[in-house]
Amino acid sequence: MAATVSEISRGLEAGEFSSVEITQEYLERIDKHNPTLNCFISVTGEIALEQAKTADTVRAEGNADRLTGIPLAHKDLFCTDGVRTSCASRILDNFIAPYDATVIEKFRAAGAVMLGKTNMDEFAMGSSNENSYYGHVANPWNISRVPGGSSGGSAAAVAAGLAPGATGTDTGGSIRQPAALCGVTGIKPTYGRVSRYGMIAYGSSLDQGGPFARSAEDCALLLQTMAGFDQRDSTSSEEAVPDFSATLGESIEGLRIGLPKEYFAEGLDGKIAGVIETAIDELRRLGAEICDISLPNTGLSIPTYYVIAMAECSSNLSRFDGVRFGYRCDNPVDLEDLYKRSRGEGFGAEVKRRIMIGTYALSAGYYDAYYLKAQQLRRLIKQDFQQAFSEVDLILGPTTPETAFSIGAKTDDPVSMYLQDIYTISLNLAGLPGMSLPVGFSDGLPVGMQLIGNYFDEARLLNTAFAYQQVSDWHLRVPEAFK
Amino acid sequence: MSEWESVIGLEIHAQLATKSKIFSGASTAFGAEPNTQACAVDLGLPGVLPVLNREAVSMAIRFGVAIEAEIDHYSVFARKNYFYPDLPKGYQISQYELPIVGRGHVFISPAEGEHKEIGITRAHLEEDAGKSIHDQFPDMSGIDLNRAGTPLLEIVSEPDMRSAKEAVAYARKIHSLVRYLEICDGNMQEGSFRCDANVSIRRRGDDKLGTRTELKNINSFRFLERAINFEIERQIDLLEDGDSVVQETRLYDAERDETRSMRSKEEANDYRYFPDPDLLPVAIRETDIEDIRASLPELPEQKKQRYIEDLGLSDYNAELLTANRETALYFETALAVVPKQCGLLANWILGDLTGALNKAGIEIGASPVTPEMLAQLVVRIADNTISGKIAKEVFEAMWQGEGDVDGIIEARGLKQITDSGAIEALIDEVIANNPDQVEQFRAGKEKVLGFFVGQVMKQSQGKANPGQVNAMLREKLKT
């Protein structure tokens, strides 16, 4: 089953099947494959069928929109009214959100169907989806491999055809890296493009929601619904949202694409480099002008990111204290005991590690050396991109330095895990949009190519990916076991 | 003069009178059922985000303009991180670097004829926490988050005060100002206006500041004065005994009239302030500031100057009449009726009226004698219908609710006797009955005149016009 959102939309429109039927089919696939992949934390079958029924009625009345009746999966950090929203953490295992995130509200209003909530690294902290209270997610291309993270459940669900599209969030690569490792298409929009309201925060100045799907065409459709100013999020942008689908198919003749030399340097797997080169040739044939550029401060992005993200998360996660909602330890003897044990027992190891590092970075006497310094470096990284975009329209490179690694391979080496984000992380620091699309395989595992755009230039990213996907079929490949 | 000098700075939290909270749409009304005025944002639910209430910013700027402060065009909200059950997010959104209101100042008058400038270091916006309730449930504490997210303006003074009296004068000045500006209701019992005092002592002449303690839990001006005085004495005793003052936070206990240690510096939190990434920096345009400046009401200092220059009131009376907005309003309402009698009116307001209000423990706004009634009383004094002495009786009767001035004068027959024939008859009678005193006066003992005036007034039951009695007596006694 390889249906795309667009195909399902056309099928529903043509009356080839109903939303209830297609939803039922996806629920059956989830039922069959989720025990192997573990990409869903919660499957909301009843809600899905209810919504599908409503969607069919809406369609029968002639009021259907492009997403009406389309089944989707949502990363389990988008709050969903009346449904558990766990962030893959024990501390929220019992948390039923009393409201919808803006993104969920918009999909609901568009008539989309919610299949369930997808697995992830706890509180979006991780690059392998191994840091989940609900267990790791398997990569559909090889179930002994990780799907990437933190939105590993969403990426794997789309790759295995358990959902035609899914939402994710990206703080340092959490959409693009799992998209690359699972061979699907994913886009992280410009910071502020998609409302963060109801999206449980990890690093507030970096977090951004976005879609996963098989194709750029589908991503354009899904992003259209997700994007837009939200008065409940002060950091959301008032920038007008263009019609992303309308510009798909425009020629990329003369498009200037820059290749940062730092993204093709030491650390990049040679086979991945080869696959990317081939994709670049394809773009060249489509008329793109390829040139070399430099992002000299790339090497600073990982330390900068980890100081800022951890500092922010150390504060963002303070509200999980066992007082008002979520996990509370048994029989606390006093307030301090309540805090220590509720948090100690409720959070996993990686979350605790990041809270502790972040707390340290913000402490009196260390603030200037860490947090303030990181903010200065963040400006330098941003300037690198601004300089580059004065010369080129898009930046291109690999999404990850290697393909999906074995489960357990890096769990004892956090720094090597953090290095997985080397090409993706600097975009979040700069607030720029980026996407990953499948461009081939290396030893049977998908390779992702990253396109980076200027601020609010998602339409150009999507169109370039669309142009490539018109002349390739990597994005339509489905792992054998899930056909 | 003591060899010790006390140094005091105040941190005042004024609750801003916005309708909704500083970062959410929930109501700020006081006294609702616990947790009924706390929305998802106030509860700190996962995923929620703050949105700044611009009205709170405007109010902070009003204050800044009124204290002639520097107002930066760029202001930043920061998170102050600490754990407490009534702090839902585990951090308070406050301001650290780049507060809305920078350095400013006010003038205080701690006693008649004294003037002093007090520096204000800064004033910043922040959200209030909820309330912990420890005495309602056995073995448990209750949390009420209605107050969580209420906008506060924290006003931090320089350590410019040298006595509890000055500290109270400063606190009253700020209290008056925020009420003039209509940005805070000033209710200290409900916690809308709270003072924390930083107190240290040093040997007179020393430049270096001593170790300070911070006093909290002070909910009236009277307690502010007592708490500071207690603390100054405590610190003097410590130093004179060869001990040292520990930097700590101390709670004032009004019942025992003492301060008690709450937490020491070692136990103090490292608040890990950093800019709140959920909120954009606040941009304040010069035109915003100018618009606010133009919309300000007449402020106490300007009012005071006008009373002195235009109305000819003394500096002291002008200070007292403008000390709070309600007193000034009372004065000006009454003055509109008797524009030519401002001195007499001022004396009545600051004398009998203030005395009666204090005795009854009520605010001027709730006075049973309205400004119109008091003005009418002044009219009747000025037109000689009653004497000043009789006026006190009329005032008392009005206070008791016996009616308006003319009604009381009529009912009690208090109209002043100004008919010279009637006064002459009284004088003749007194002279005839006191031949010895007449002799004394004629022998040059001027003081006896007072005796005669007293006798005539007594005969008239106080109603004779004292001026007339005086003049006519002199005339009669000479002959």
Image: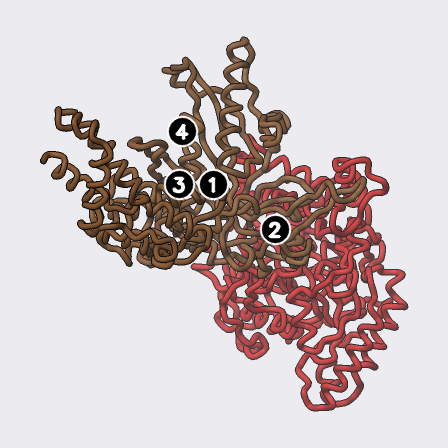
Chain colours: A red, B brown
Residue B184 x %, y %: 47, 51
C-alpha span from label 3 to label 2: 26 Å
Which residue in the protein does label 3 denote?
B173
Circles 2 and 1: CB distance less than 8 Å?
A: no
Residue behind mark 2: B147
Mark pair 4, 3: CA separation: 13 Å
Q: Nearer the viewer, mark 4 or mark 1?
A: 1
| Residue toward you, A143 or A312 | A312
Mark 3 or 2, which is nearer the eye? 3
Mark 2, other Cα within 10 Å: few <14 / some 14–19 / many ≥20: many
Q: Mark 4 highlights which residue?
A: B161
Q: Earlier in the sequence, mark 4 or mark 2?
A: 2
* Residue type pointed to by label 4: Met
Most foreground residue, A423 or B10: B10
Q: Residue furthest top?
A: B242
Name the image quarter holding the N terminus of chain A.
Answer: bottom right
Instruction: Classify mark 1: residues with Cα within 10 Å, few (<14), some (14-19) or many (20+).
Output: few
Whether tag 4 and tag 1 are in contact, CB under 8 A, the answer is no
Q: Amino acid at mark 2?
A: Arg
- Quarter of the rendering containing residue A409: top right
Which residue is label 1 attached to? B359
Q: Is residue B169 left or right of residue A61?
A: left
